[in-house]
Image: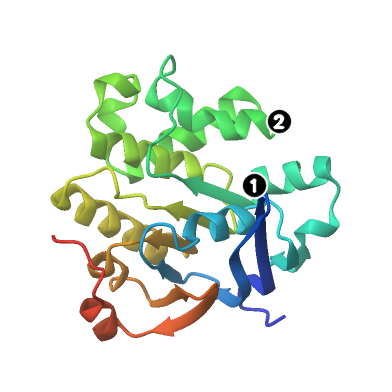
Amino acid sequence: MNDDVVLAVHDLHKTYIMGDERVEVLRGVDMEVKSGEIVSVVGPSGVGKTTLLHIMGTLDRPTKGRVLIDGTDVFELSEEERARFRNRAVGFVFQFHHLLPEFTALENVMLPRIIAGDEPERAREVAEALLRRVGLWERRNHRPGELSGGEQQRVAVARALANEPKVVLADEPSGNLDPEHGEALYGLLRELSCSLGQTFVIATHNPRLAAKADRAVRLSGGKAVPVSAQDLLNLSWKIAI
């Protein structure tokens, strides 16, 4: 694998058995993501974007194929090893923030480092720095219910970065936001990519936002097909902005 490649998937297949029916969602996806890149994965709802990200992040297993993160073949690891590796090497941002409602923004961002075994003081130091970076220092002691949707997603982004992951996987991160806050969130991801060299893979059905990535692939027929920014804006399934 090229030294610059952080994430690679090879001949990825995923088939679901539903009664007597076989549903082939992924049919041989090949894809590489380089360090510091933002890559968008586009396609209409139901095409398999979430399935692909879940397999990339080891939340699900492929029917066939390999996933390598920073050179590690993740499905060759035991379940316990894979869980430890995932916590250290992969960050997640979902459409719904999944913050713990009883904890403050600061405590939510501290959690991944606590789980990884950090001392609370170190976890707090990292979380405070990240909340400053995403512009939420003054909201650090607020619980999720006291934050706007855009603020909640910024906390989720900070949490995803807490363990300095090799890659952050974002599944429709702006899907629950209005257009203005969606644009702002993508601006934040771009800034983090530039300033931290952070790698992002972003699944979205919004071609306009996908066009802001360094490059894009479209899921079609269960495979990943490169697509240009101009072609993205011409796709018939794009949503109104």
Q: Quadrant of the N terminus?
A: bottom right
Which of the two discs, 1 and 2, labels the residue nearer the N terminus?
1
Q: Quadrant of the C terminus?
A: bottom left
Q: Distance between the residues labelled 1 and 2?
A: 21 Å
- Disc 1, SS: loop
- At x 17% / y 46%, what residue is drawn? 178
Q: Mark 1 points at which residue?
A: 59
- Disc 2, SS: loop
Amino acid, disc 1: Leu
Is residue 113 toward the left or the right of residue 147 in the image?
right
Q: Residue 117 carries which label?
A: 2
Q: How many marks?
A: 2
Residue 150 drawn above or below residue 213? above
- At x 30% / y 48%, what residue is drawn? 175
Q: Are marks 1 and 2 in contact (CB under 8 Å)?
A: no
Q: Could you tell me residue 99's position as x and y percent? A: 43, 29
Amino acid, disc 2: Gly
Residue 84 drawn above or below residue 220? above
